[in-house]
């Protein structure tokens, strides 16, 4: 203290941490204090001539920091890149090559047409996600889908993420079927890619289970994902309805998957089941497409 003869005055704190914090606040304003513990609790001892200024400083500090909490470590979901996305890219390339060597036969039986789906060819909603108009169309979807689906596979598990993105792509085709007034032939993996982006956009929702103050981070992540979708999915020259449908389905499926512990999603059991379902869907829908060849027009 600045004077050995003066009797220091007391400023009471609720606990030790608050007393330490207040001591630093006062020191930043040039007010010396001593942290002490008495029978009644933790206190700060300040010189009489500094007492009123100390109280005013602490009062202002509390006003300016009302509702603010010390930073807490949050258990962020693990997001790593999964190189299994290469297999998805190669599968799309294989379908494109098979379509080329078959004289566009795969496109003929697998493209999504509203009239064909309305007549009962529901499998075209699925098969269309594996086809592309030309090499440029394929490369555009692979260039975006490779990093997006690779990260989604790292977050949700490789086949769990692929199955969810695949179903989101089908959802995008359903949206196109429902909301396009004049739907021509539609195909491409862009709805699936936008579904993968939806999975990534909502992945931070799992933070709410471990920290009640995580909503601003969750909202920030969602906002960032929506901005990416705006940049990548709203090209007027593309099928915006299918993109929006795929992205929305990805958000819904991703929100549901955040309820499942990440360890289970990354585990072998979940990925074995999802992998089997994905393979069965692809095989079944293409088998139906090849068995139900439409008559020549």
Image: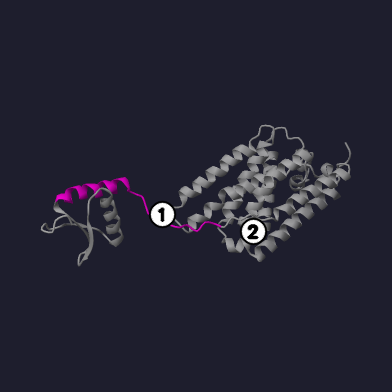
Q: Residue at x 20, y 65 (%)?
A: 40
Q: Secondary structure at mark 2?
A: loop
Question: In terms of sequence position, does the residue under pointer 1 or pointer 2 come before the other?
Answer: 1
Query: Which of the pair 142/247 is nearer the observer?
Result: 142
Q: Is residue 58 magenta?
A: yes
**Which x, y percent locates residue 144?**
68, 44
Position of 182 with respect to 219 (left or right) is right
Q: Which residue is pictured at 69% across the width and 36% down the height? A: 239
Q: Which residue is depicted at the point 50% across and 49% down? A: 218
Question: Is residue 84 within the magenta segment?
Answer: no
One can see residue 243 in this view: yes
Q: Which residue is mark 2?
A: 157
Can you see residue 113?
no
Horizontal side of residue 183 vs 215, given as left or right: right
Q: Position of residue 211 (x, y in %)?
A: 45, 57
Residue extending furthest bottom?
39
Q: Is residue 60 left or right of residue 120?
A: left
Question: Mark 1 or mark 2, which is nearer to you?
Answer: 1
Cα–Cα span, label 1 and label 2: 30 Å
Residue 52 in the image, given as x and y percentages of width and height: 17, 48
Whether 126 is drawn above or below 270: the answer is: above
- Residue 29 in percent (x, y) is at 26, 48
Quarter of the figure that contains the N terminus: bottom left
Q: Quadrant of the C terminus?
A: top right
Q: Residue furthest left?
A: 5
Q: Which residues are magenta?
A: 49-77
Q: Which mark is residue 71?
A: 1
At x 76% / y 57%, what residue is drawn? 280
Q: Local crowd at mark 2 within 10 Å, few (<14), some, or many (≥20)?
A: many
Q: Nearer the viewer, residue 31 or 12?
A: 31
């Amino acid at each position: 203290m600045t004077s050995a003869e003066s009797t220091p005055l007391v400023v009471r704190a609720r606990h030790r941490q608050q007393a330490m914090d207040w001591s630093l606040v006062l020191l930043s304003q040039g007010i010396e204090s001593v942290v002490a513990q008495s029978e009644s609790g933790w206190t700060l001892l300040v010189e009489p001539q500094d007492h009123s200024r100390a109280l005013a400083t602490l009062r202002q500090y509390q006003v300016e920091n009302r509702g603010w909490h010390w930073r807490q470590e949050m258990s962020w979901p693990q997001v790593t890149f999964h190189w299994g996305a290469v297999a998805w890219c190669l599968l799309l390339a294989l379908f494109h090559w098979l379509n080329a060597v078959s004289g566009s036969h795969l496109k003929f039986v697998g493209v999504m047409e509203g009239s064909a789906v309305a007549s009962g060819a529901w499998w075209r909603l699925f098969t269309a996600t594996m086809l592309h108009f030309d090499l440029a169309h394929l490369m555009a979807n692979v260039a975006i889908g490779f990093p997006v689906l690779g990260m989604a596979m790292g977050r949700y598990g490789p086949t769990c993420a692929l199955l969810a993105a695949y179903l989101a792509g089908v959802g995008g085709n359903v949206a196109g079927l429902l909301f396009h007034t004049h739907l021509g032939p539609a195909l491409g993996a862009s709805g699936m890619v936008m579904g993968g982006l939806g999975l990534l956009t909502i992945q931070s929702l799992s933070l709410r289970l471990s920290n009640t103050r995580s909503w601003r981070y969750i909202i920030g992540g969602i906002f960032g994902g929506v901005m990416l979708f705006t940049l990548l999915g709203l090209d007027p020259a593309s099928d915006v309805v299918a993109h929006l449908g795929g992205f929305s389905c990805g958000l819904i499926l991703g929100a549901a998957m955040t309820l499942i512990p990440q360890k289970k999603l990354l585990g072998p059991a979940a990925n074995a089941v999802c992998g089997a379902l994905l393979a069965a869907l692809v095989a079944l829908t293409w088998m139906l497409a090849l068995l139900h060849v439409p008559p020549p027009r």
